[in-house]
Image (cartoon, grey):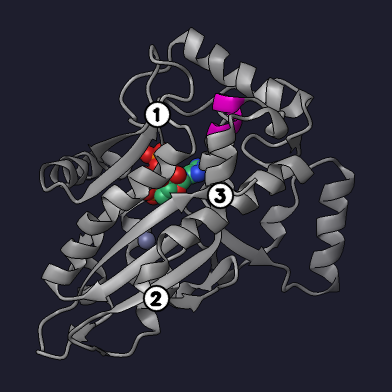
């Protein structure tokens, strides 16, 4: 099977990738597969994971949680799909239609089933016989929380610890860009000041943690990959207003673009307005979230230190309790 990489740079979506960047990505991917860290599932950006991957992944997540212990955040877990109604209120489809994905199911009768099977027999695609269900794959794990907190947020705000599956339709041969992955988020909903404080106050803590893993980290203003021409404007605004910061690391060496392995995001009143959230003083609630990209941190570690975990530098193993 030959696959072409449809993505552009990992951190920006401006130019097509240099051939040697593609080669560097292919080399890391080949190494992770050859060393049985990941298992190719035959679709770009979808992998099975072996014991060595899980060992590091679990350690990364535990260290991330440990670093945010002082927040005393409320733990919430959600399934990998969300109701369409909840998805709608996030406005995700307006900004990222190309990344969104929905669930479909079969609702037909025997006749339709026979037509489906006949199409399948002819080697044709049969998913057209499925009907959209009112479920979407969750693209960002904090989304479900905003619909669950009630209308009024206490003045001191609330903190949430949320980890779960994210799905984004961005097939790629870059092992750092998966279609199905996990992020561990620490979300705050509160006043404009407390949301800003959450986003800003966590940045040094996150940086220190990621550096303790022996990774070279830069914290840079960033934008989400908003779709289309209007999206370019939104992306510029996001950078100008310094709403999003990414923790980037040079996975493919200093000559190539860095990759974001975590982010810290200020949503201002975006979710507060969409979900009708107010703080006790009657003002629209603001929110912020920090997100650890668990697979990206894990793979960045393999890229930096190799696939033999027992041979990693002692301080790195100590930071990860490995
Ligand atoms: P990028 O610019 O690289 O696409 P993003 O801005 O879309 O990243 P966020 O929406 O901030 O990423 O998601 C939080 C974190 O989740 C990212 O910092 C990254 O570590 C991780 N992440 C995002 N997209 C992917 C993906 N396709 N595969 C693996 N991890 C991802
Ligand atoms: Zn979030
Ligand atoms: Mg992205």
Of mark 3 and mark 2, the one earlier in the sequence is 3
Which sits in the foreground, 192 or 172?
192
Which sits in the foreground, 212 or 51?
212
Label count reads 3
Provide residue 35's location: percent of width, then percent of height: 77, 26
Label number found at residue 216: 1
**From mark 2 to mark 1, how far is it between C-alphas?**
29 Å
Residue that appears at 62% across and 22% down: 28
Instruction: For the C terminus, give its image quadrant.
Output: top right
Provide residue 234's location: percent of width, then percent of height: 19, 46
**From mark 3 to mark 1, how far is it between C-alphas?**
16 Å
Residue that appears at 73% across and 35% down: 37
Provide residue 295's location: percent of width, then percent of height: 57, 44
Of mark 2 and mark 1, the one earlier in the sequence is 2
Provide residue 20's location: percent of width, then percent of height: 50, 8
Badge 1 marks a residue whose secondary structure is loop
Which sits in the foreground, 268 or 158?
158
The residue segment tinted magenta is 300-305
Q: Main secondary structure of the magenta part?
A: helix
Where is ligand 1, by quadrant? top left
Q: Is residue 155 left or right of residue 319?
A: left
Q: Which residue is mark 3?
A: 60
Q: Which residue is mark 2?
A: 72
Q: Is residue 88 left or right of residue 76?
A: left
Mark 1 surroundings: few (<14), some (14-19) or many (≥20) residues within 10 A: some
Residue that appears at 57% across and 43% down: 318
Badge 2 marks a residue whose secondary structure is loop
Q: Give the quadrant of residue 137.
A: bottom right
């Amino acid at each position: 099977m030959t696959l072409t990489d449809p993505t552009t740079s990992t951190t920006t979506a401006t130019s097509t990738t240099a051939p040697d960047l593609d080669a560097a990505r292919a080399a890391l991917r080949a190494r992770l597969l050859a060393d049985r860290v990941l298992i190719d599932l035959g679709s770009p950006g979808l992998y099975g994971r072996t014991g060595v991957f899980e060992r590091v992944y679990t350690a990364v997540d535990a260290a991330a949680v440990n670093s945010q212990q002082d927040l005393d955040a409320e733990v919430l877990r959600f399934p990998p799909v969300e109701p369409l109604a909840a998805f709608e209120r996030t406005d995700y489809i307006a900004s990222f239609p190309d990344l969104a994905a929905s669930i479909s199911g079969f609702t037909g009768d025997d006749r339709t089933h026979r037509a489906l099977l006949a199409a399948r027999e002819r080697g044709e695609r049969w998913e057209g016989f499925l009907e959209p269900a009112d479920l979407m794959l969750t693209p960002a794990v904090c989304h479900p929380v905003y619909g669950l907190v009630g209308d009024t947020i206490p003045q001191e705000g609330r903190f949430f610890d949320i980890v779960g599956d994210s799905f984004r339709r961005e097939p790629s041969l870059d092992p750092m860009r998966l279609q199905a992955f996990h992020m561990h988020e620490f979300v705050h909903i509160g006043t404009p000041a407390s949301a800003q404080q959450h986003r800003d106050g966590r940045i040094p803590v996150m940086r220190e943690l990621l550096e303790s893993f022996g990774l070279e980290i830069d914290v840079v203003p960033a934008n989400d990959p908003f779709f289309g021409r209007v999206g370019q404007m939104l992306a510029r605004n996001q950078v100008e207003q310094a709403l999003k910061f990414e923790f980037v690391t040079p996975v493919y060496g200093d000559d190539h673009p860095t990759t974001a392995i975590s982010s810290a995001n200020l949503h201002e009143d975006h979710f507060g307005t969409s979900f009708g959230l107010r703080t006790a003083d009657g003002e629209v609630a603001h929110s912020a979230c920090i997100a650890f990209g668990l697979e990206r941190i894990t793979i960045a570690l393999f890229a930096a230190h190799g696939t033999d975990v027992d041979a990693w530098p002692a301080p790195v193993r100590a930071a990860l309790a490995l």
